[in-house]
């Protein structure tokens, strides 16, 4: 196991009716910028709960942070925050609203002359004002991590950076999930699966507790996926869904182990160029990446095959290949495309992505073995419809 330091200071406030406790956790005297997406919170009652909870808290609203939050929109929110002398940001919505709010919080602590896109490109925020969330979509784990992924319309780019601080608190009420569409749930389950795999699917023998925790999350996802397709899943299923998303990317399963993240890097490019939902891109890229990188991944695939998918027959290579098939079948069972052609991604997108990795001289993945050459192979493997 590698040396590590674990520190996750986010207060997680979880359960039915907990949005009512919002004001208890916002420091007295705060001037709050409350950020929203496109309006789902008005349709599912979350906005009314937030407004009631903030009745005695000074605040101003900003609406319109879109999926895959755009720097062009966030500049407007930052300007509003400066004008109103905001000192606390509260994101109400999915991962996009919260990721966008992390950049807003960083920009409000920075020199007004600095363009916030520079914070993303350099990955060097100088600070951030406190921020928190009411998370309405289980997927990103953004509610309990410092990551933020921001897109730029002008350049069709999408990059991640880390805020200097975690959310001070996040409120998660599983009842918020009942308004999610089947497509949103499918993409989110693929995202949670991919987060777990990025931290697990490297090589075995690094940490028993990390492996068992990750496998526990994967088994939970397999258990709840069919239940979430029922017309009205029970509350405890929704609660398991929400908590699994949080645990998938709050650094709990990352202690002392190597990590991959190449699938995410490729998936972000697909979203930036096509607009396909983040989780949906990962269902396409992950099986292809595992097929191309099988020499590096074989031993861990055999372990996951046995412990998660019940694959026990054959040579190690046969078991690894069967495990990838089982993972792809799991993504397909969610109703997601698992190939670029099935998702109607034009072949020109593949070439643009390869050129971008070439220009960046990328060497990513847990061993730095994924360069533009492997990216080209991964996209070619992901292309043909099944
Ligand atoms: O904008 P509104 O109207 O609120 O609608 C949203 C949005 O259209 C809707 N929605 C959210 N909660 C809902 C709901 N609809 C009905 N009922 C609810 N309870 O869902 C749509 C998608 O929302 P979005 O926030 O974009 O989804 P998600 O949470 O999956 O976030 C995706 C973004 O997070 C980034 C992705 O790259 C992408 O930009 N990620 C962030 C990470 C992090 N911070 O750690 C890690 C991830 O790997 C990921 O990269
Ligand atoms: Zn993700």
Image: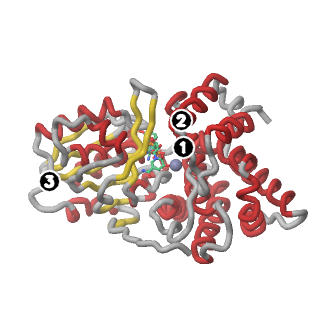
Q: Which residue is mark 2?
A: 269
Label 3 SS: loop
Asked whether disc 1 touches disc 2, contact meaning CB atoms under 8 Å apart, the reply is yes
Q: Residues within 10 Å of mark 3 (few under 14, many from 20)?
A: some
Label 2 SS: helix
Task: Say which quarter of the image contains residue 367.
Answer: bottom right
Q: Which residue is mark 3?
A: 57
Task: Say which quarter of the image contains residue 223.
Answer: bottom right
Quarter occupied by the N terminus: bottom right
Q: Is residue 45 visible?
A: no
Closer to us: mark 2 or mark 3? 2
Residue occupying the point 26% across, 63% down: 21
Residue occupying the point 65% across, 42% down: 285
Q: Is residue 230 visible?
A: yes
Q: Is residue 278 left or right of residue 350?
A: left
Residue occupying the point 60% across, 44% down: 282
Mark with earlier residue (2, 3): 3
* Residue 232 rendering spot, x and y as whole percentages: 57, 52
The residue positioned farthest toward the right in the image shown:
314
Residue occupying the point 35% across, 46% down: 123
Asked whether disc 2 touches disc 3, contact meaning CB atoms under 8 Å apart, the reply is no
Q: Which residue is mark 1?
A: 265
Label 1 SS: helix
């Amino acid at each position: 196991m590698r040396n590590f330091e674990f520190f996750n200071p986010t207060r997680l406030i979880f359960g039915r009716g907990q949005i009512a406790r919002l004001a208890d956790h916002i420091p007295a005297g705060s001037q709050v910028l409350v950020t929203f997406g496109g309006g789902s919170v008005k349709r599912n009652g979350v906005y009314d709960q937030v407004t009631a909870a903030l009745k005695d808290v000074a605040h101003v609203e900003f609406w319109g942070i879109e999926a895959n939050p755009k720097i062009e929109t966030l500049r407007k929110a930052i300007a509003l925050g400066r004008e109103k002398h905001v000192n606390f940001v509260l994101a109400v919505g999915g991962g996009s609203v919260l990721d966008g709010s992390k950049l807003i919080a960083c920009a409000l602590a920075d020199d007004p002359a600095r363009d916030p896109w520079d914070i993303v490109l350099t990955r060097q925020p100088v600070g951030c004002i406190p921020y928190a969330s009411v998370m309405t979509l289980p997927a990103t784990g953004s509610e309990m991590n410092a990551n933020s992924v921001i897109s730029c319309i002008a350049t069709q780019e999408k990059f991640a950076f880390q805020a200097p601080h975690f959310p001070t608190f996040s409120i998660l009420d599983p009842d918020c999930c009942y308004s999610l569409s089947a497509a949103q749930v499918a993409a989110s389950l693929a995202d949670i699966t991919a987060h777990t795999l990025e931290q697990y699917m490297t090589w075995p023998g690094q940490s028993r507790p990390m492996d068992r925790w990750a496998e526990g999350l994967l088994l939970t996802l397999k258990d709840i996926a069919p239940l979430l397709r029922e017309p009205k899943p029970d509350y405890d299923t929704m609660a398991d869904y929400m908590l699994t998303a949080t645990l998938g990317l709050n650094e709990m399963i990352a202690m002392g182990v190597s990590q991959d993240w190449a699938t995410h890097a490729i998936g972000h490019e697909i979203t930036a160029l096509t607009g396909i939902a983040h989780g949906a891109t990962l269902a396409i890229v992950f099986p292809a990446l595992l097929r191309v990188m099988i020499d590096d991944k074989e031993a861990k695939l055999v372990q996951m095959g046995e412990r998660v998918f019940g694959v026990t027959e054959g040579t190690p290579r046969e078991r690894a290949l069967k495990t990838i098939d089982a993972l792809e079948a799991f993504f397909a069972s969610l109703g997601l495309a698992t190939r670029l052609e099935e998702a109607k991604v034009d072949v020109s997108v593949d070439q643009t992505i390869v050129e971008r990795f070439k220009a960046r001289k990328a060497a990513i993945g847990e061993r730095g073995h994924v360069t533009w050459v492997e990216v080209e192979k991964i996209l070619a493997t992901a292309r043909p419809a099944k």
